[in-house]
Amino acid sequence: MSKLRKICVYCGSGPGTDPAFVAAAEGFGKIMAENRIGLVYGGGAIGLMGALARTVRDHGGEVTGIIPEFLMSRERALRGTHELIVTRDMHERKQLMLEHADAFVALPGGIGTLEEVVEQLTWAQLGRHKKPILLANIKSFWDPLCALLDHMRKLEFIRYDLSVEVLVAGRVDEILPKLIAAATAVTEDEKKMTAAVPEQM
């Protein structure tokens, strides 16, 4: 049985137009810290990323930021984290996020957030890891993606033998229980992925 030690959270470098998004980031950050689950995230100090990381840090939680060198100034890397890892590029960033985390959560965000969570779904679909992946569907933000995935399944572009489970939670207090339940079915060995695999895909 696998234990959740760290969760990688993908989310926007902007706050979005609805205050509920920032509130969700802060709410989940508090839940993570209170449950002694470390945060792995994109390293920025702005938007939902900053709100989430500061909340985890300010409530005594462990924060690992992973940020490419070229984004250090644009996303204003958050100082005072437990660990800040500066990578050569986006590929290395995503690889290290995978290696450091036991599960993945996507809060609302933009193209980068979408790309990161879809890449994790792809790796899981191809059998490279079995770590839980969850969409935090705050204010129905991820409804269009869920509808697209259903559309792909109906047209058999996502076939039965290539299906991957995507967890969905509408409220932040649902996220951790769903991840814990999913993680109980994953062994430590099944969570592992060799460093060379993403470059080979």
Image: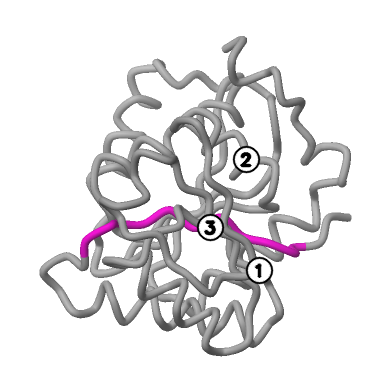
Residue contact at pointers 1 and 2, CB within 8 angstroms: no
Quadrant in the picture for the N terminus: bottom right
Mark 3 is surrounded, within 10 Å at the Cα level, by few (under 14), some (14 to 19) or many (20 or more) other residues, namely many
**Residue 38 badge:** 1
Residue range of the region highlighted in magenta in the rendering: 4-14
Residue 92 in the magenta stretch? The answer is no
The residue indicated by pointer 3 is 65
- Given residues 179 and 52, the one toward you in this image is 52
Q: Residue at x 46, y 47 (%)?
A: 67
- Given residues 77 and 131, the one toward you in this image is 77
Instruction: Tell me which label, 1 or 3, sits earlier in the chain.
Output: 1
Q: Residue at x 58, y 27 (%)?
A: 123
Q: Residue at x 24, y 69 (%)?
A: 139
The x and y percentages for residue 175 are: 53, 69
Quadrant in the picture for the C terminus: top right
Instruction: Tell me which label, 1 or 2, sits earlier in the chain.
Output: 1
The residue indicated by pointer 2 is 96
Horizontal arrangement in the rendering, residue 69 relative to residue 133 (left or right): left
The x and y percentages for residue 81 are: 56, 70
Image height check: is 184 above or below 118? below
- Given residues 125 and 156, the one toward you in this image is 125
